[in-house]
Amino acid sequence: MTRRFTITTPIFYVNGAPHIGHAYTSIACDVIARFHRLCGEDVLFVTGTDEHGQKVEQSAVAQNMAPQEFADRVSAQFRQMQKEMAVSADDFVRTTEPRHKKAAQALWEKVAENGYIYLGAYEGWYSTRDEAFIGEEEVTLHEDGRRTAPSGAPVEWVREPSYFFKLSEFQDRLLKFYEDNPDFIGPQGPKREVESFVRQGLRDLSISRTSFKWGIEVPNDPEHVMYVWFDALANYLTAVGYPDPHAAKAAYWPANVHVVGKEIVRFHCIYWPAFLMAAGLPLPKRVFAHGWWTVEGEKMSKSLGNVLDPKALADEFGLDQLRFFLMREVPFGGDSNFSRRSMITRMNVELANDLGNLAQRTLSLIARNLEGILPARGQMTGDDEAIMAQASLLPDLMAEQIERMGISDALEEVWKLIRAANAYIDRQAPWALKKTDPKRMGEVLRVLYDVIRTIATMLQPYMPDTMGRMLDQLAITENERSFEALKMPVEAARILPKPEGLFPRFVEEEKA
Ligand code: MSP
């Protein structure tokens, strides 16, 4: 039976236009989803937009728009951004869709039916920017009288009737769950934070609001709208057709991994599993938190005017170059900084020199010296066998890295092979063999061809367009592009099309 694999991005607030941080999380999930598809798995990759709550309502008001109209506009921008980034999501959940409203209300009803919801009143701090209730002990009082949440966002005092979720009853069950499932939270830093937070004791959680209207109505009490995080987290169930147990996608739950930014780990690793336990539903297998991007050393912000538009970057550097840079620059999980200089360096060194030249040198020799006809495999020398063996190990090495969310480490495995192949071509110098030993030249080029085929196949998840074109140049047909197909050697005498450079060097224009 084909293995199923379900992966999700966070759903994005529609309070502002998408930027590089949103593109990053989407592309990371896309790489993992594509990788699993190429392994032959049946993948469900879900993304979407988080459209309710005070923050979105306030942004709509500031734009003089009705919240729905505003959400429609910004949600479409996120969809468009993902299209521009070649993000191959299978579903896009909007929290204002009827199917989502149904799922969120069904989840609420189930949790209530099981006795975990009660009516009370909330009195305390709230941060609209974080859409989070902030405990007194977490609030910082500044000299000028401002009060802020740990994120730096302002907090305000709210007092309103509210439904509560009995989170306090889940402390022990959560701790036991983390212990029994040591891979549930990754990487280690966030895992330790979550565990210590839970160990300190959990308070019941306010899960409805009455001071504004932009949300999903609480079942049987239209005075209340759901707390936006209860609503938002339920999106993961919407995608699998909850509450219908016979929905076409029902078997895709539980999710294999929720990928999230590190700032929303608490919601995904404490509230979400507790809601699911309360509803008697299976828990996701994993929540993995990645770090944050700064730009030229500064936090991105509208006021600094340094918010990076992914489309503009893709237009300037190339989409696959951008995807590669984002995935390569930082070990997945860590924070990183976007600088033009490192973008250009990686493009020129790793793509143009290392990978581009390897392919271009090999393919142009086959074109020029062998009329584009793929030579047969020959008698292997020790050097040939070593590089071929290294190439044949690559798929498993990468799969291990992807399994542990090592998106960047998996690329390092590819680059080890690319560097080894460049050393091999320099040692063997096939260009010098044309006159002295043309048979051997063909054998060397064939070894290189096979290695490049492996590289191009394995890099498809990261650079789908460019690697598709590289595989075209290798005359690898569409149905020979899966990881499994790598085990089948290509027969000799295939005609390779005329090669073209795929990774131009980027030359920064002189500033006047
Ligand atoms: N709506 C909530 C998530 C609900 S999930 C049930 C939310 N939305 S968000 O739009 O503010 O952020 C979503 C995600 O975008 C973050 O978790 C993170 O993955 C990504 N990023 C936003 N800014 C980022 C950076 N500067 N750097 C890296 N990723 C960041 O939170």
Image (cartoon, rainbow, N blue to C red):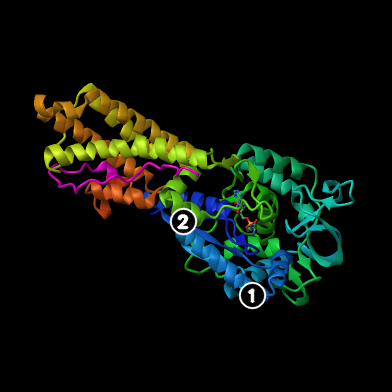
Chief secondary structure of the magenta span? loop
Q: Total marks drawn?
A: 2
Specify whether residue 241 is in view: no
Could you tell whether 339 is left or right of 505 in the image? Answer: right
Residue sitting at 34 percent across and 38 percent down?
355
For numbered disc 1, what is the local secondary structure? Answer: helix
Give coordinates of residue 295: x percent, y percent: 60, 45
Q: Residues within 10 Å of mark 2 (few under 14, many from 20)?
A: many
Label 1: which residue?
68
Q: Residue at x 21, y 49 (%)?
A: 475
Is residue 53 toward the left or the right of residue 307 in the image?
Answer: right
Relative to 284, 422 lies left or right: left
Instruction: Please state which of residues 165 and 29 is positioned toward the viewer in this rendering.
Output: 29
Q: What segment is highlighted magenta in the picture?
A: 486-512
The amino acid beneath tag 1 is Gln
What's the residue type where badge 2 is placed? Met
Report whether 141 appears left or right of 424: right
The residue carrying mark 2 is 85
Mark seen at residue 286:
none
Residue 113 drawn in magenta: no
Q: Is residue 505 within the magenta segment?
A: yes
- Is residue 89 positioned above or below 213 on the image? above
Q: Position of residue 418 (x, y in %)?
A: 35, 33
SS type, badge 2: loop
